[in-house]
Image (tube, rainbow, N blue to C red):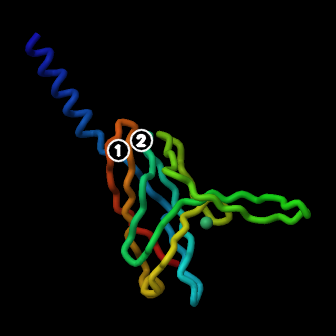
Amino acid sequence: MKKFSLILISLLFLSMNNYAAEVKFSSALIKTPRPGLNITSGFFTLLSDHDLLIKSIQADLIGRIEIHTMAMKKTADGLEIMQMRKMESPKISKGVPFVLRPGSDHLMLYEVNSQISSTKKITLKFTFESNTGDLLTQNVVFDIN
Ligand SMILES: [Cu+2]
């Protein structure tokens, strides 16, 4: 019995250790703001082996970072317009790529310091919440182009 609980405890310990959800980013890119503008957009693909919520994204030199959905809407007079909406705590489903790409859902960066235009890389700090309420952070290097 004692041996059994020892095994159980070490299994628990192992799975807690492994908890550090594996979150893989690819195609992480931020567009250089156009001259005179302090907002821009960014893109990435994320794949996680756990269900997660994106709680916040922060970076030096950037005032505020949001994730937006984008959809084309027809107005009453038949015009096609782009409609962007902020996603509150976007949900990442285990094993399902979360894709932000040009012309679709995207990162929206506000109050961007002009110094960003003279650098090639920037680190964004992502804070995730697991479905057990744990918070985890991950620094992700984005290309600026
Ligand atoms: Cu947007």
- Spot the residue most to the right: 77
Residue at 49% from the left image edge and 45% from the top image edge: 92
- At label 2, which amino acid type do we have? Asp
Q: Residue at x 39, y 70 (%)?
A: 59
* Residue occupying the far top of the picture: 1
Tell me if residue 143 comes above or below residue 18 in the rendering. Answer: below
Q: Which residue is at the front of the view, 55 or 117?
A: 55
Asked if the residue at tag 2 contacts the one at tag 1, i.e. Cβ–Cβ closer than 8 Å, the answer is yes
Q: Residue 86: x and y, percent? A: 58, 58
The residue indicated by pointer 2 is 49
Which quadrant: the N terminus? top left
Left or right: where 45 falls relative to 60: right
Compared across the picture, whether 99 is left or right of 1 comes to right
* Residue in the picture at 79% in, 58% down: 73
Q: Is residue 39 above or below residue 27?
A: below
Q: Which mark is residue 21?
A: 1
Q: Position of residue 14 (x, y in %)?
A: 22, 33
Indicate which quadrant contains ligand 1.
bottom right
In this view, the residue in front, 40 or 94, is 40
Among the 4 quarters of the image, the one containing residue 60: bottom left
Kind of residue at disc 1: Ala
> How dense is the environment of label 2, judged by Cα within 10 Å: few (below 14), some, or many (20 and up)?
some
Compare residues 134 and 124 and report the one nearer the observer. Answer: 134
| Residue 8 in the figure: left or right of residue 141 | left
Asked where in the image residue 37 lies, by quadrant, the reply is bottom right
Could you say whether the residue bearing mark 1 is in a helix, strand or loop?
loop
Looking at the image, is 137 positioned above or below residue 114? above
Choose the circle earlier in sequence order: 1 or 2.
Answer: 1
Report x, y in % for residue 57: 42, 62
